[in-house]
Amino acid sequence: MPDFKHVTETVFGWAAPPIKFGLGASRELAYDLSQMGVRSCLLLTDPGVKAAGIAQNILDLLAAGGIDVDVYDRVAVEPTDQSWHDVISYVRQGKWDGFVALGGGSVIDTAKVANLFSTNDGDILDYIAPSVGLGKAPQAPLRPLVAIPTTAGTGSEATSIAVVDLLDLHLKAGISHPRMRPSLAIVDPNLTVSLPAEVTAACGMDVLTHAIESYTAKGFTHRPAYEHPKQRVAFAGANPISDLFCERAIALVGQHLRAAVLSGYNLEARYGMALAAMYAGIGFGNAGTHIPHANAYPVAGQVDGYHASGYRDMPMVPHGQAVASTAIAAFRFTYPSAPERHLKAASLLAGRTADRGLGAEALPSVLKALMKDIGIPRGIRAFGYDEGDLDNLAEGTMKQQRQLQASPRQVDLESAREIFRQSLLED
């Protein structure tokens, strides 16, 4: 065989956890844990899930199944490095066979980090992805983690990443490693029925941007070839397997998000959105997200004074609102890189063939209509930002190189600023 090197990448990796999906699937948790050899576990959840009675139902099931359980119910919505430090301190004082995450993406991400630091030394910034952190890989194996989402949003139950708000740096960043992917995802649409409309809308937009970003991401063959397999990253770029999941997720959001927001007890809509979130998580967990997520980190990290309806009373931009707020301008910017993919995404979301004559506006027009119907802010001015914030926001985006490397079109400081400028005008 001739000795030659490929100039561009020819291989992509793809992974997903075992998944148990369906109405009532959470009732089998004790059995599933026992099959992993887990006899004692730490259940992580948040005050909202506890107040809804969902946590107690799970605790009753675990007790009936003979699983010893401790509870950490102080997980912060939109976690910060401070809240992560609190949970890390807690888990380093105990020892369990495994972990259960019961909640939205914030809970599942926090449980991943709790699991990581229960067996590995170091601090948060040691593991945060470059250029913000050192990007250290865990040295010790992690324990079994079962993720049970109570929202249809992040798809974190299917991914290997956890995201945090770094308070002193005024930005969000992530820790990602294949060992952090849950051992099992249990997706029970019943658990999402009590989700408030505003939260349902924000979570749904997170699902949608995950799927569209991954579908339009730089293809895995459009990257330089790696010198060694150990250099190959988990987020490979758009690939044939992720494409299938992303297409289905986009279509499901178009079919079900409006009904899930406007009629929360519509079980068909909740079922469809739970599927969409899982599909999108599988898709972006292997392909990766790009500009809207890179923008979302400074949008959320630099906010001062915005209080989101349906969430705890504190200055905060929910993640789903943050990613949606620049998506219209971002996909307008990326359109020239792959017009057919953008038009296909618009068609899937709208449930009809997109008007090709609209070109770069085809996908933005469908997004605007959906966001108007579900009451999501269509720009960053709603969060209190104005022209004087554009430079800081753009600089924050440029720190998110993991996401920007997946962009199908190169992003520099000026183009990032222009996307934010357009996003001031969308509302």
Image (tube, rainbow, N blue to C red):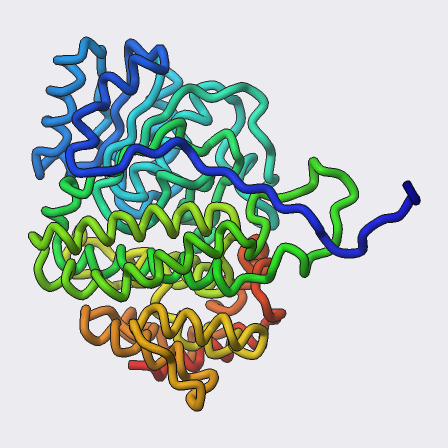
- Please give the name of the residue rendered at 19% of the width and 56% of the height, measured from the top-left corner: 200
Q: Nearer the viewer, residue 11 or 40?
A: 11
Q: Is 408 situated left or right of 54 in this image?
A: right
Taking the spot 31% from the left edge, 44% from the top edge, the residue there is 105
Q: Seen in the image, is 374 located left or right of residue 335?
A: left
Residue 358, placed above or below residue 20: below
Residue 260 figure quarter: bottom left
Question: Is residue 94 visible in the rendered structure shown here?
Answer: no
Residue 285 location (% of width, % of height)? 47, 46
Give the quarter of the figure containing the N terminus.
top right
Q: Is residue 178 visible?
A: yes
Is residue 99 found left or right of 333 in the rendered image? left
Percent position (x, y) of residue 231? 70, 41
Q: Is residue 149 above or below residue 205?
A: above
* Residue occupying the point 24% across, 53% down: 273
**Total numbered circles:** 0
Q: Pinpoint residue 361: horizontal percent, then vertical percent.
A: 42, 84
Taking the spot 43% from the left edge, 63% from the top edge, the residue there is 212
Residue farthest to the bottom, as pictured:
357
Location of the C terminus (image quadrant): bottom left
| Of the pair 24 and 392, the residue shown nearer to us | 24
